Amino acid sequence: MLALLPECENVREAGDFVVELKSVSKRYGEVLAVAKVSLGVRRGELLCLLGPSGCGKTTTLRMVAGFVEPTSGTVSINGADMTHQPPYRRDTGMVFQSYALFPHMTVAENIAFGLENLKWPRDKREARVEEMLKLVELPHLAHRFPSQLSGGQQQRIALARALAMRPAVLLLDEPFSNLDALLRVRMREELREVVRTVNVTTLFVTHDQEEALTMSDRIVVMNAGHVEQVGTPGDIYEAPSTPFVARFIGWCSLLKGMVGPDGAFTSSAELRLTGNWSAGPSTAVIRPEHIKLSADSAAGSSHQARVLHAHYYGGATRLLLDLNGEHLTMQERFSFGSQPKPGDVVDITINTHEIRVIPADERP
């Protein structure tokens, strides 16, 4: 269990949001990297900016940090306009993708660097460094150099250095990207615990949907410089507002088609799903868990499908099915050796009570 640390000192009452962006845009010549983004980060919240490479999430983070100046719009922290202020005036702590530890300094010296620049007395600096090392459970590494640390240890020290100043806002730029898969899972759990313990307002950038779903209080999904949707992990996964969000968050099958006057959805390949959706061109979002092997019409829409591929993932098998020319993905746990094989014809039920049908969207 990580050591307890008092709530960040510098956070003061300033309305609903500690960080607020209003119509923030950033243009590089003819390229519009961020387009009129407006969002707020609540006190003590971990808000994640999620999206593919080039969507504008890191540029947005760097505008909050002060490393990039917006072309238009405003950035406020604790109610004060920081749009044109340098990074050192913004009361933020930053953990970079590469950690950016000073290689010629020891761990303790790295953590104390900002405090020394502020002319903290030596005894207070040493006490704060000791406190930070206990927080990240690395007090025995105070006199080592970054080159003598593992990737996970460097990540923790970078976090300790960012938190040593008690910032109002913690900024994280894909801090797990240099770690292997198992360590990445462990470190995100530890980071989440640290953030909750300190109760620091946090803005986190990642392209990893699993990180976003497991760590965030809310997620901002970005695409081509725009905000596609903002919501809790459950909102984003269960109720995506656009096909892009549905496709980017979790595994799903997207079927284009039309909802008729009777509320039923018919795909372009004539697959019909009964429901009570709004009429018009639409896209059906079907998650793997919405499909079961059975022919229980009471649970939804029953069909026969042919297995195209079967991929075993240890805890479950993922099947790619051909249903009237539509390709659907389902996932189920089978007893060893009993899973369907390519070419098999199976009875399936699609739970039409849980699938999402949203207005058609032709954006990428």
Image: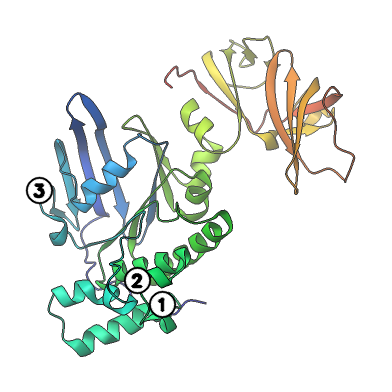
Q: Amino acid at mark 1?
A: Leu
For the image shown, how many numbered marks are present on the structure? 3
Name which residue lies at 17% across and 77% down. Answer: 116
The label shown at residue 84 is 3
Q: Earlier in the sequence, mark 1 or mark 2?
A: 1
Q: Amino acid at mark 3?
A: His
Picture layout, residue 139 above or below residue 224: below
* Relative to 109, 87 lies left or right: left
Name which residue lies at 50% across and 41% down. Answer: 235
Nearer to me, 85 or 302: 85
Measured Cα–Cα span from mark 1 to mark 3 = 33 Å
Displayed quadrant of residue 341: top right
Q: Position of residue 163 (x, y in %)?
A: 31, 69
Residue matched to label 2: 160
Measured Cα–Cα span from mark 1 to mark 2 = 8 Å
The label shown at residue 356 is none
Nearer to me, 333 or 29: 29
Q: Position of residue 125 (x, y in %)?
A: 23, 83
Q: Residue 242: in sight, yes or no?
A: no
Residue matched to label 1: 135
Q: Position of residue 185 (x, y in %)?
A: 55, 58
Q: Earlier in the sequence, mark 1 or mark 3?
A: 3
Picture layout, residue 188 above or below residue 106: above
Q: Amino acid at mark 2?
A: Ala
Task: Give the label, 3 or 2, closer to the camera.
Answer: 2
SS at circle 3: loop
Residue farthest to the left, as pictured:
84
